[in-house]
Amino acid sequence: MEVYGNYDVIVVGGGASGCAAAIESARTGAKTILIETLGIVGGMVNVVGPPGWAFAHLWNEHGEDIIGGFVKETHDILEREGHALPYPAPQDRSWCSLSMIDPDHYGLLMFRMLRDYDVSLLLHTMAVDVLKEGDTVCGVVVENTNGRQAVMGKVVIEASGEGDIAVRAGVPYTKIDRTKEEIDPPSITFHMDGIDWNKVTQYYKEHIDQLQPIRNGIYDKEMRRIEGIRQRALECDSILDLVRIGVLGNLEYADLSMKAMQAGDLEPYGDLGHFMAPRSHDHFQAVFQHTAQIKDCDTTDVTEWSYGESEARRQIEIAIKAINKYLPGYENAYLTRVTAAMRTREGRHFIADYQMQTEDVVSSRKFPDVIAKCMQCVNEGGPFHTAGNKNVLSGESNEDSDLSVAMASFTKFKYPQDGGSYDIPYRCMVPKGVEGMLITGKCLSLSEDFKRDLLPDNIVWGQAAGIAAALCVRDCLTPRELEDHVEDLQAILLEHGAILYGTK
């Protein structure tokens, strides 16, 4: 087999996490290659997912910064160049606050940074197998227009999202039991423009109880926050004013969605709610992320995955007609963009030297080998989203849109008990039984209760993996041996702006 090249670090997957891993690996001094199936990088940010919910939950419920590093660095670049909204004011920062970015400019920025740090790119290439010496991965087998080739490396980072290379390497994993719970559904994101935001603003001023911003499960505090946002909406000139300051990121249209479904004009697998994406010159588009989604679709099975891709696009055609018909101000709205593939949410849960558990979240656990912070909740024994007509995380139920009833029905959600955050330990990236590999992004070792399609979190996990891999090469350590020298990794993370200590 032809050897394509020899590298210090191989990153499999050019998504949000993989880009961060490759850039940080090269920045730390390692000869790095990034392998990606498509001809574009950025993953869930610009290829298959948001940006609607992209740069969010960067703060805990006390308004403390918990995610910095590569996330803040790239946000600040985009903001300076006019492609991201500023961070919310300190008094407006919470788990539900967000700063929106232009997804396409994020993708361009990733290419720019990969070039700046001399990361080798192997695009339009699928990694199909691994090369091992005993238990140690020493390279990956790829296929592309040139045929089958070997890419050799000292450390391989699995950042593909689906984890196919980790499987080929023999990393153990579990999957949710489909007989007991619904699979968190994959979905297609699509954008629409041509919206009359003045009509949208007027609708919500006349139906202010329908304004339901993103929220978490701390009921009393959230109701006070929502009422505050509703009051701001009544006083603002445009609903977009609240988007610009980061306190409003989504419009749900729960009642209108139900009306469309009851009339047979909308499939019962999504809704008409959407996020917003900022474009140049203070322009905004609607980003529909939960409108076309596939019930009980296991994307680790290619037959189900293929069906889902087709079905999601069928749902988009139906949804566009419903959007034009039912949403005030959207009568002349038109489709501008459909993401290249479905955003996958569930899949394999890999087992590393440590696997995060629900109790770690509830207790806001801190670890000595911390490489990142997180405050996303877990959901015991159930999906974060449902392929019914409402987003479970939003707190809606199919029968009643009253928030108090809905919140009481989702008691399985577990949050950090003090409104703070919990640590992610380095050991979650070191797979059981396999040497020479790190797992990151959606492949990070988390139990079935965890939500894994978290963009800022995936990015900073990737950042940590990239630096760790480079350190292993520099110091002639295996990823597992680095567990005993994790302070070296933490020192560089702090130099690169990561937040590891000093928060609740």
Image (cartoon, helix red, strand yellow):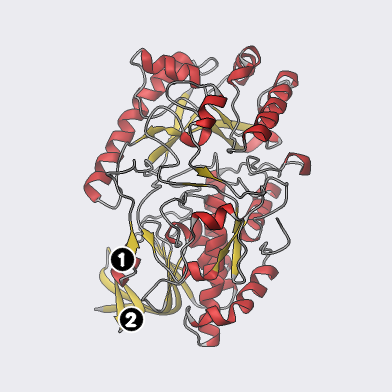
* Front residue of 207 and 194: 207
The amino acid type of the residue labelled 2 equals Asp
Residue 405 lies left or right of residue 296; in this view the side is: right
Residue 359 lies left or right of residue 317; in this view the side is: right
From the image, which quarter does the C terminus lie in? bottom right
Rendered view: 410 above or below 198: below
Q: Position of residue 342 (x, y in %)?
A: 37, 43
Write the residue at 58% across / 43% down.
Answer: 102
Residue 4 lies left or right of residue 31; in this view the side is: left
10 Å crowding of disc 1: few (<14), some (14-19), many (20+): some
Task: Please indicate, yes or no, whether residue 115 appears anywhere in the rendered image.
Answer: no
Residue 135 tag number: 2
Q: Check if mark 1's residue and mark 2's residue have beta carbons within 8 Å.
A: no
Write the residue at 63% across / 40% down.
Answer: 96
Residue 271 tag number: none
Q: Position of residue 355 (x, y in %)?
A: 46, 64
The amino acid type of the residue labelled 1 equals Val
Tag 1 secondary structure: helix
* Front residue of 295 and 392: 392
Rendered view: 435 above or below 39: below
Q: Position of residue 46 (x, y in %)?
A: 49, 47
From the image, which quarter does the N terminus lie in? bottom left
From the image, tell me which residue sits under label 1. 167
